[in-house]
Amino acid sequence: MVELLVVIAIIGILIALLLPAVQAAREAARRMQCGNNLKQLGLAVHNFHSAKNRLPCGENDPDWIAFKKPGTSGRLDAVDIYSPLCSLLPFVEQQAIFDTITSMLATASATAPYDSALVPQTNISNVTIGGMDNPFRSEVSAFGCPSDPYWKKPVGSPNYTGTTSYHCNRGDAQTGSNWGETRGLFPNGINMTFTLANVVDGTSNTLLFAESMSSNPATADDRKIQSGVAILDTAIRTTTPSQCAATRGSLGMLGVAATNNKGRRWPDARQVYTMFNSILPPNAPSCRFNGEREMLISASSYHSGGANVALCDGSVRFVSDTVDCGQITEVLGQSLGSNVNEPQQWTGPSTYGVWGAAGTSNGGESQQLP
């Protein structure tokens, strides 16, 4: 009996020693797969650029707003908010989804009288279109980090929109997703389009995508810092990043009420769904200022100590939570004379340190991420 107890104790000790090692190995594999997904998205952008001689737009992408209501010059409903991820579908081996979307849009453009129900809606309010599934219900493996527990749709909830763990660089200015300019890389297509030639700070110094974990759909008040968005509902032009950072509570949770919609729609270009800001460091709080369009969305991940990012040269890096973020106690460039009401028009170097500099495509900085 004594010998049996000793053997059981030894086996218990070995299991206790091995389990953390197994978990660490699994996380290392997930982190590697996540980095590979970002690598594929970076290559997809380069292939898109080669085909179109421009980058995808954040809103009002020319390819999507080219679909008009029959007999008019007005665009179809909802296509203005189709995200860059929609444009990249053919370049991440999802040509079938892309063809379904464009076929449905062509049908809507040719059908009179016009019926908005024929247009795929990003909130999939029309779950089926002409007897076919809304293509935005699709889960795209290239858009999901395997460490993101809420990336996959809940079991038994097939009518959810597909989600994403990867967000597009909207820059270091607190702006709404439909504002005309951006210091990042995915502007409103009505105002401008970007090419890689616009990345004058250097493609190896400028962010393209970053991880930002999707929210928990099972709760309306997701207070986990990586996945929730703190509700401030203040003025976006005057709220400082430090006020958003101050919503951090204890034990990795937000200290105020939060939303649960971050990353929940990969086809939607609005800030909370597919954009991020290089203002607060990875795994800092994200905050809502005024609805879905005006937010400060931070990079985040469940990889220990930071988050993966993709740069414009196609490389992938891991950025630490402790990256330098400069003067988060003020609105971008305020002490240097920028217009607080139009922060996206600031043309100087970022005042948000190395992280802010990485988010600008034409800030005049040559800083490299550590």
Image (cartoon, grey):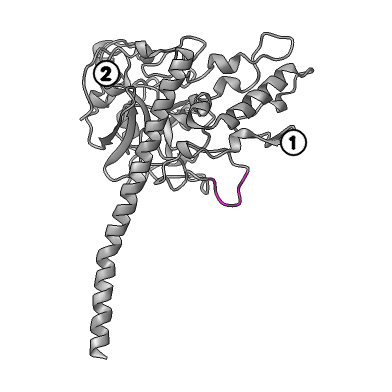
Which x, y percent locates residue 79? 60, 21
Q: Decide which of 85, 124 is in the foreground and name it.
A: 85
Which amino acid type is shown beneath numbered disc 1? Gly
Which label was assigned to residue 350?
2
Q: Quadrant of residue 162?
A: top right
Type of amino acid under label 2 = Ser
Q: Main secondary structure of the magenta part?
A: loop
Local packing at callout 2 (Cα closer than 10 Å; few below 14, some 14-19, many 20+) is many
Vertical order, 370 against 110 (above or below): below
Helix, strand or loop under label 2: loop
> Residue 131: which numbered mark, if any?
1
Is label 1 in a helix, a strand or a loop?
loop
Marks 1 and 2 in Cβ contact (< 8 Å): no
At horizontal 67% and vertical 24% (from top left) the residue drawn is 103
**x, y (%) of residue 244?**
35, 33
The one of 93 and 247 positioned closer to us in this rendering: 93
The quadrant where residue 132 appears: top right
- Residue 2 shows in this picture: yes
Q: Nearer the viewer, residue 26 or 290?
A: 26
Q: Is residue 18 above or below residue 327?
A: below
The span shown in magenta is: 153-158
- The reply to whether residue 211 is visible in this rendering is no
Q: Residue at x 40, y 16 (%)?
A: 182
